Amino acid sequence: MTTVIHHWLDGAPFDGQSGATADVTNPATGEVTGRVALASEADAAAVIASARAASLTWGATSVARRTQVVFAFRELLNARKDELARLITAEHGKVHSDALGEVARGQEVVELACGIPHLLKGGHSENASTGVDVHSKREPLGVVGIISPFNFPAMVPMWFFPIAIAVGNAVVLKPSEKDPSAALWIARLWKEAGLPDGVFNVLQGDKVAVDALLQSPDVAAISFVGSTPIAEYVYREASAHGKRVQALGGAKNHMVVLPDADLDLAADSAVNAGYGSAGERCMAISVLVAVEPIADDLVARIAERTRTLRTGDGREGDGPEADMGPLVTRAHRDRVAGFIESGERAGAKLVVDGRDVRPAGEADGFWLGPTLFDHVTPDMDVYREEIFGPVLAVVRVATYEEALALVNANEYGNGTAIFTNDGGAARRFEADVQVGMIGVNVPIPVPVAYYSFGGWKRSLFGDTHAHGTEGVHFFTRGKVVTSRWPDPAQRRVGGLELGFPRND
């Protein structure tokens, strides 16, 4: 009998009333391993109502107590992270070591949230005006919605919910229907850590569940990560219903390699950042910009490394672990293969073709091996579109200025990298490039949790990035209190004065 993956409401699994479900598959075998519940409007309303009720008590709970619960969650996750990683691999397909890395990066934000007492401190100005003091403080919003993508079923939610919970909000998490089990596993861990029922909830589903979060008057804020068209929709719809929104969209990340760079380091980095997690990363390097005369040498080194990669079932077995797993669904695999065909038709040179990769004994999985194109031009679909698969496109340019112009002309501004041994060139690139996250000899510049994650242009809708100080501000509202306490030993000072108040 196929397992049904339910919602999480009031600290327990919740069947819901819709009766609608969707298949959950193991990408390595194509086998249907479960069915995820798809919420109705009534199901969504019940989950949101639970969060609303819990937020009133949790928001009034002391910062010390909230921090203790977050720390307990951190300890439990450290002890059982392998269990979560195996669950991610079974539904997403990424190899076990990559899944463990995902959990570790998400845990960084949990650890940041353990320091929430310091991050919530306000300011105080004594005697700002005669006998008048001013202080500021930050308070929780109430209920916040998190809508997360399939490619990081643990890390992306953890960019948001540790801080949201630590500052006093209740959370409704809507995970991807493709790999929904990690969210329920996390919900159970929160309960074990001592989080009160209703503070962390899981709403499974499709667009019905998403729209319920975007439109509910009881949801104060939305955090979203996904494709740019959906990010735009989430931003417009949630904003129209009076919510604050951080909607992180798509990307087309460029890695610029200057002639003085260490080419072995650059080749290793291009392969790691282009093909890790089967390219299903918003921070994957999908375009390598080679500044001549190094392109022939660099492409040869990348191709040599690419051909050594092992594609296979990401679950740990008796033999060596694969380097790269399958894509998440058959439809997505076919879409990525379509871009490879388009690149060939457009005249790009196909150096390594991953379309025929089939690990032994795994013919029914959603397989597509690492693919390398050379002589790609900006008018080709393989350059312009976000492929979200293991396809690396090499564009050749003559100068640094041409490389910079190419990056800045792109509609996305999520991440970029430059490889060089020239500190002056790197510093100039940092200043001139119009992208939110920059790596210098670092191919995937995802910042540590105490800095904020997010891009520019069509990679971000809203004004606030994820985690770090910006994340704390997103999940809280500021208050400024101006107070006067007359000295009881002095005569009352008053009188009528209708002019605008002055600071004296």
Image (tube, helix red, strand yellow):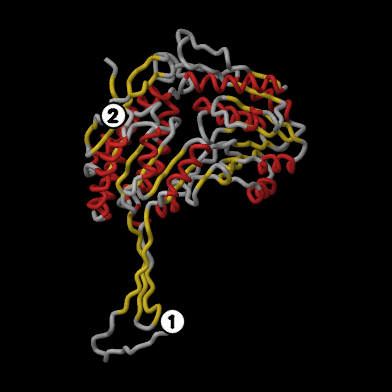
- Residue 116, position in %: x, y? 34, 53
Report whether residue 110 is seen: no
Q: Is residue 404 above or below residue 21?
A: below
Residue 18's label in the rendered image is 2
Asked which secondary structure carries label 1, the reply is loop
Who's the residue at 73% across and 26% down the image?
A: 296
Q: Which residue type does callout 2 highlight?
A: Ser
- Residue 300, position in %: x, y? 69, 23
Instruction: State the quadrant of the N terminus.
Output: top left
Q: CA distance from mark 1 to mark 2?
A: 58 Å
Q: Is residue 234 above or below residue 207?
A: below
Q: Are marks 1 and 2 in contact (CB under 8 Å)?
A: no
Task: Please state if 217 lies on the left or on the right of 320 as rendered.
Answer: left
Q: Could you say which is closer to the camera, residue 189 or residue 38?
A: 38
Quadrant position of residue 95: top left
Who's the residue at 43% across and 14% down the image?
A: 319
Task: Please state if 125 lies on the left or on the right of 340 as rendered.
Answer: left
